[in-house]
Image (tube, grey):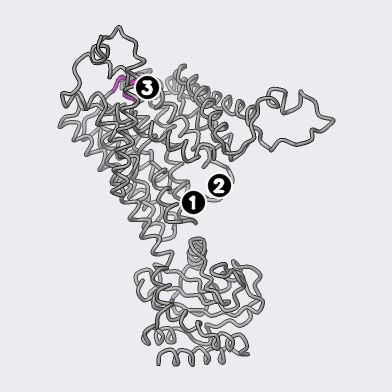
Amino acid sequence: MSFLAAMTNGSQTLVPIQMVTLGVLILAAHLGGKLFDRFKLSVATGQLLGGVLVGPWALQTLGLLPAGFAYTEAVASFSFFIFIFVSLVAFSIGEELHLDRLRYVGRSTLMIGLIQTTLTFVLVFLGLWSLGRLPLIEALIIGAIGVATAPAMTFVILNRLRIEGRLRNILGSVEVLSDVIGIVIFSLLVQLARRHGNDYSAYASWAVAKLTLWPVLKNLALAHGVGAGIFLILLILIRRQPPSLIRDKESSWDDATGLLSHMLAEHPSPTAQIFLVVVATVSLGAGVAHYFHLPFFAAAAFAGFLVANLHSHAIFDSLKIDNLSALLNLSFFALLGSTVRFDSFDRYTALLVLVYVATRTFGKIFGTWLGCRIMKEDRKIASCLPYLLLPQAGVAAVEAIYAATILGRPMIAAVLLPSIVFFEIAGVLMSDRTLRHWRSWVSGEEAAFRAASQRKTPSAAIERLLSILSPSDILLDIATRTKEETLQALVRHAAQTASQPFDQKEALQLIKEREQLMSTGMGHGIAIPHGRLLALDHPIVVFARHAEGIVFGGMDNAPCHLIALILSGAGTPDDHVKLLGAMAQLLGHEETRQSLLTTQSEEEFFGIIHSAAETSAT
């Protein structure tokens, strides 16, 4: 029998067909990811579209796959991997739920997350229910899925641009909070849908709702019990501390580690062995929860929460090993793309996609902005954060497939999967643009600054610097012990002498983030910390001298004795760069630096700078 005949003969084994199918899907996704990466687009989106193009529904639509072809059955047989992958994603969310991290981000982040999550859920639900005329339960489920975000691609951009600090912490916490809330709401709605379907009276009647809510909460509690079981298995199989070379003579085999743990446990370092143990354990627990119709997302997420707070952080690191995580992502998006169906896509579905995209976009952007305004968050964060929450991928895609298959509601996947492709492309492009804008604010155009410091600065820039600086802006021999104390003293003095008020906390945070991006130590005992504030209309300059010197890092990592703080408005990047260049040029002369180090008064210090400026301008 020919291979083609075997592929259409349902009585034949699926093994060779599955092998061929898996190879086709992986190669198509790989090529799609490479193509998108070439054009600086989301690799995950390229992989997803690669899977779409060789999926059975696309091939059938194009007339390339005849009826009865076993290729469709082979693709369906791999669908279990999608649920394993999303269980790992839910488990890894626990890394962001460490109690210390939650306390660090504070009430502001919590409120921002709750406001934008609530608004997004309500807008998506109302839009699809009232405008799209979707059944109530389907509109609610899609609303819950709309809450989910895709932090992976955003954090890839953050890492590439070397952005740290409060923006990164708030973004990570808000995204995790959105996913957790979305998972909980989604799990509850799925349980309700399985019990009552389209019986809307069950949702409207409070008496019935109470009777309905009890089994839902019970299932949620049981799912948390499964999550605790996952944690206990990991606790046994993965040590929390490195094994001691010499065992305590008084300890016995039935102590806290136990004989099983002693024989089987792995050292908690990010290795392939730990990776396999985590995958197997999470898959086992999530599979048990799924079999008993429990919300397995919640089970995996609770296990991750327990691991983050009671076990080793290296367990999460093992899921980030480059080659292994890349293999997981490629396989997931290839299989996910192959499940996209075209047979149910029509004008009505296109309308629903448009409504979903519009309501989710407005909910995320306006809700985040509103939360930032209510909590009086830093204005730069309020202007950037809303656009970083648009990408959507893994969790939302799997929830869509799960709802479509388990509940028998294909319209959910038909609406969400095209929308997810849109948000992966448009959202990632928007995130990249926004973060580059943020970096330009924080970095102060570092490349231009370096160039300006190496060429002769126009006399106008030096005159501008002299017009800003006065003897009252000079601090001689400040008594600080650390870099942070020094920055605090400079900012505090700037606030006292500046004609325009500004937020000292915001300014200090900005400068510290700038230092994390790249040290402002210039070598030769000089440091020029700087930043651009939205609230400032006029630049501020403060000069300080430190007798013992403070290490800022930078070129030579030597202690800095001359420290100049420059703050300017975010809307004047050229002015900021010129001031930095003028300052670097003034302090570039050895004679000037030695004179500044030995002068006895602020007036003499200012006079030396004035003389150096006149010399540089001529």
The residue shown at (72%, 25%) is 258
What x and y, as percent, mark residue 298? 48, 29
Q: Which residue is mark 1?
A: 169
Q: Dot 2 corresponds to which residue?
A: 101
Query: Which circle marks residue 78 in the picture?
Result: 3
Q: Quadrant of residue 547?
A: bottom right
Residue 293 is labelled as: none
Q: Please name whichever residue, 25 or 475, is drawn nearer the observer in this view of the structure.
A: 25
- The stretch in magenta equals 403-409
Q: Residue drawn at (68%, 26%), measured in percent from left and top?
A: 261
Q: Position of residue 89 (x, y in %)?
A: 45, 34
The C terminus, quarter of image = bottom left
Frontmost residue, 160 versus 5: 5
Measuring from the top left, give residue 62's x and y in whole percent: 16, 27
Q: Earlier in the sequence, mark 3 or mark 2?
A: 3
Three-letter code for the amino acid on which mark 3 is drawn: Phe
User: Is residue 405 a member of the stretch shown in magenta?
Assistant: yes
Q: Are marks 1 and 2 in contact (CB under 8 Å)?
A: yes
* Three-letter amino acid code of the residue under disc 1: Asn
Question: Which circle's residue, 1 or 2, is located before the other in the chain?
Answer: 2
* 280 w.r.t. 533: above or below: above
Q: Residue furthest front?
A: 2
Viewer-nearest residue: 45 or 1? 1
